[in-house]
Amino acid sequence: MTTFHDPLVSGLLADAKLVAGYGRYGVFKDSALFAAIGDAEKLSDASASQPEVVKLQTVLNDCSSTVPFSTLAALRTGWSPGDMSRRTALATYFLIALSVTMMIVIGKLTYVYNRGVSINAELQEIDNNDFSARFGRRSGRSGRPRSN
């Protein structure tokens, strides 16, 4: 690897290599980024105005639709999409278990809510039918003796 004196070129090449490493997981449909990195690395003393560096910048900008800046920022901090360490695996299983638990709890709460809505509808229907007045008249009649 050639060491560049221009910090812009070295930063650009470092970012391009990070994106290319991410692209090895099947993200890119062509190899333009890999070719541009190879062309830029062949330069002995690269400056930002050389055509190979400009082409690398253009190809890297075109990759921004496939690899968003947030992914590039995560790659800069050391994140790797293929990381299957024990910690990552445990975090994945924990999130799956948490998701299933949340689905069960939400399902139970939905059932309770729907049952409450149906009870409320029944109570409103009873209230609309003026049940207490009718019940009061019937119970009042049943206790009195008939007069003929």
Image: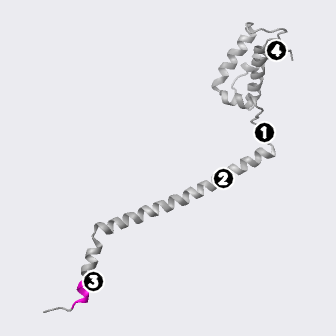
Q: Nearer the viewer, mark 3 or mark 2?
A: 3
Q: Are marks 4 and 2 in contact (CB under 8 Å)?
A: no
Specify the amino acid type for callout 4: Glu
Specify the amino acid type for callout 2: Leu
Going from the N terminus, do you reach mark 4 or mark 2 first?
4
Per the image, the residue denoted by label 3 is: 139
Q: Nearer the viewer, residue 138 or 68?
A: 138
Image quadrant in which you'd find residue 6: top right
Image quadrant in which you'd find residue 3: top right
Q: Nearer the viewer, mark 4 or mark 3?
A: 3
- Give me the disc on residue 98: 2
Q: Disc 1 and disc 2: Cα gap in Å? A: 21 Å
Is 64 above or below relative to 148? above
Per the image, the residue denoted by label 1 is: 83
Q: What are the residue bounds of the magenta stretch?
A: 139-144
Going from the N terminus, do you reach mark 4 or mark 1 first?
4
Q: Nearer the viewer, mark 4 or mark 2?
A: 2
Q: Which quarter of the rendered picture does the N terminus lie within?
A: top right
* Residue 88 rendering spot, x and y as whole percentages: 76, 44
Q: Disc 1 and disc 3: Cα gap in Å? A: 76 Å
Q: Disc 4 and disc 1: Cα gap in Å? A: 27 Å
Report whether 114 appears left or right of 91.
left
Is 64 above or below relative to 85? above
Going from the N terminus, do you reach mark 3 or mark 2 first?
2
Specify the amino acid type for callout 3: Ser
